[in-house]
Image (cartoon, helix red, strand yellow):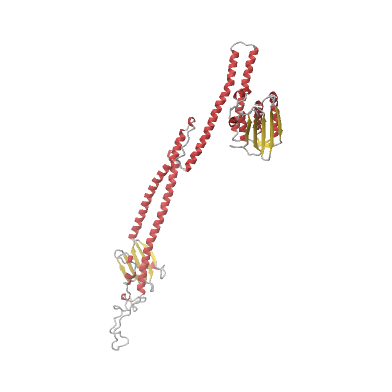
């Protein structure tokens, strides 16, 4: 059972199967509803016509019974006789055309008169055509209140008994025609116009039953045929509709790290699928850009680490190649120390970037006094500025924002270090901090060598240097400005750069005062 379930579930969970199943269910329900309505309306119309004919036949018999008989012809009176003698020239009571006898006024109470007194042939002239066709099996009967048959005609032997008629007529109301189905005989019954007489007209509806059954079989066959054609057509349409998805799957399965530039073809797709494919292509663009960035980052990091490692190896090999004086050993050790310091600063910068990238998911924010933070960093970098013969001036407004103090300190420190390191002797660094109701603006201006305009768009790329030779002399790793940009992004801020060659550079940072927990 478990194996059968496992083999069934993968097929059941396919999108194609579910769409086909829903389509088949809706199609079948629609056909069943339409067929049921059509069958019901056709059957109702047919039985309504038959019931109308039966009602018309019953009313025809009732009308024949209500027509008064013509008066009997009286001959010229003969000679006077006794009062109690019947006239000699009159028909005898109960004779042909008389009023007496079992069916005349002189017969049993409740009689209707003799058979000649009712013109039953009126039925053939007044009844619907269906009831008088010779090929149809019909009957028409009139029962007296005591069960005697007053009138009987037709060509079917399946007529109801008086016991059945009398029990059924007890629930009938005078003047209302009741229609019932008895086997294959459909009949209309009416309590007659004279003291309990019952009129019955019946017709064999087996042809109509066969016709209804044939129509039902035709509906079922047509429904099965239409369902089959609809399911085959739906499967064909669904296959063509899902073909772009299969092509997308095949293309996606071939994308590797070696061919991240491959994209899904959206030109021949429908609007919905083309939008989906365009979203996937956009995602692939971001993945490729991130992968290329990581690859470039690894290559640059390896390149940056290779230089100090080469210095370390060459210095140690040179020192160990032969005996040297203490001064020579000292020079080689100092060279190794500088190389190790460079490796340390590079590794610290890489660790900082790694931690900040990880903090994109969750960064704890707290109130930070931005003026005091800038004041502390200026104080820490004052010795370096003195060493480079650079003066630092500041105009700091008292302001507070919500942020992460540690990485904000690193941002200000990198900008100060950059402004001092690339400044000219006797230059200045101006630090200006202003605020309004919503934002905090920090500007760090220097009178350094400046940055070419064509280099500014690449300034925040990792390991990028404007003057690579000078950067190595000053110990730069090309990661400081990348860290500053990431700090600003984590605080939902903005960083701008203005620079002129030989005049100096200005770094302008705008940070919101209030922000929620940063998530990406």
Q: 111 above or below 81?
A: above
**495 vs 301, nearest the viewer:** 495
The outermost residue toward the bottom is: 80
Does residue 28 appear anywhere in the picture?
yes
Q: x%, y% of residue 5? A: 44, 40
x and y, in percent, of residue 204 in the image: 33, 62
Q: Position of residue 288 (x, y in %)?
A: 52, 32
- Quarter of the image for residue 95 reads bottom left
Question: Relative to 399, is 217 on the left or the right?
Answer: left
Task: Count the labels in the image.
Answer: 0
Image quarter of the C terminus: top right
The image quadrant of residue 429 is top right
Q: Is residue 237 left or right of residue 519?
A: left
**Left or right placement of residue 334 versus residue 96 in this view:** right
Q: Residue at x 69, y 23 (%)?
A: 387
Asked whether 153 or 504 is in front, the reply is: 504
Q: Which image quarter holds the N terminus?
A: top left
Q: Work out whether residue 5 can be spotted.
A: no
Task: Between residue 180 and residue 325, name the one nearer to us.
Answer: 325
Where residue 178 sits: x, y (%)? 39, 66
Given residues 463 and 58, the one toward you in this image is 463
Residue 232 to residue 365: above or below: below
Is the residue 77 above or below the residue 1 in the image? below
């Amino acid at each position: 059972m478990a194996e059968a379930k496992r083999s069934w579930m993968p097929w059941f969970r396919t999108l194609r199967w579910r769409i086909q199943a829903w389509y088949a269910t809706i199609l079948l329900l629609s056909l069943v509803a339409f067929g049921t309505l059509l069958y019901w309306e056709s059957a109702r119309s047919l039985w309504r016509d038959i019931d109308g004919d039966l009602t018309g036949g019953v009313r025809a018999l009732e009308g024949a019974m209500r027509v008064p008989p013509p008066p009997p012809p009286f001959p010229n009176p003969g000679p006077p006789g006794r009062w109690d003698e019947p006239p000699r020239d009159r028909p005898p009571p109960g004779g042909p055309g008389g009023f007496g006898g079992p069916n005349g006024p002189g017969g049993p109470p409740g009689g209707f008169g003799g058979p000649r007194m009712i013109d039953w042939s009126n039925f053939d002239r007044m009844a619907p055509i269906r009831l008088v066709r010779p090929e149809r099996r019909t009957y028409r009967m009139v029962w007296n209140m005591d069960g005697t048959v007053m009138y009987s005609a037709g060509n079917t032997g399946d007529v109801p008994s008086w016991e059945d008629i009398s029990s059924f007529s007890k629930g009938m109301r005078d003047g209302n025609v009741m229609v019932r189905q008895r086997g294959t005989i459909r009949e209309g019954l009416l309590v007659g116009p004279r003291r309990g007489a019952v009129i019955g007209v019946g017709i064999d509806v087996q042809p109509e039953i066969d016709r209804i059954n044939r129509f039902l079989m035709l509906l079922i066959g047509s429904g099965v045929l239409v369902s089959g054609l609809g399911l085959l057509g739906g499967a064909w349409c669904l296959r063509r509709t899902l073909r772009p998805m299969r092509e997308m799957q095949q293309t996606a399965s071939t994308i590797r790290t070696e061919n991240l530039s491959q994209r899904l073809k959206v030109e021949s797709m429908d609007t919905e699928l083309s939008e989906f494919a365009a979203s996937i292509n956009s995602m692939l663009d971001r993945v490729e850009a991130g992968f290329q960035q990581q690859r470039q980052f690894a290559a640059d990091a390896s390149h940056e680490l290779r230089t100090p490692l080469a210095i370390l190896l060459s210095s140690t090999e040179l020192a160990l190649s032969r005996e040297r004086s203490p001064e020579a050993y000292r020079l080689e050790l100092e060279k190794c120390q500088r190389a190790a310091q460079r490796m340390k600063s590079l590794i610290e910068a890489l660790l900082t970037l790694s931690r900040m990238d990880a903090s994109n998911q969750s960064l704890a924010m707290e109130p930070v006094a931005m003026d005091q933070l800038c004041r502390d960093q200026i104080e820490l970098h004052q010795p370096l500025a003195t060493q480079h013969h650079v003066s630092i001036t500041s105009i700091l407004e008292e302001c507070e924002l919500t942020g992460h103090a540690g990485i904000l300190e690193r941002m200000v420190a990198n900008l100060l270090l950059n402004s001092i390191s690339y400044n000219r002797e006797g230059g200045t660094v101006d630090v200006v901090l202003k605020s309004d109701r919503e934002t905090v603006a920090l500007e760090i201006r220097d009178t350094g060598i400046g940055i070419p305009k064509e280099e500014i768009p690449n300034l925040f790329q990792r390991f990028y240097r404007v003057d690579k030779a000078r950067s190595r002399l000053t110990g730069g790793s090309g990661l400081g400005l990348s860290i500053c940009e990431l700090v600003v992004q984590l605080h939902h801020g903005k960083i701008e750069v203005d620079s002129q060659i030989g005049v100096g550079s200005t770094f302008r940072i705008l940070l919101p005062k209030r922000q929620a927990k940063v998530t990406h």
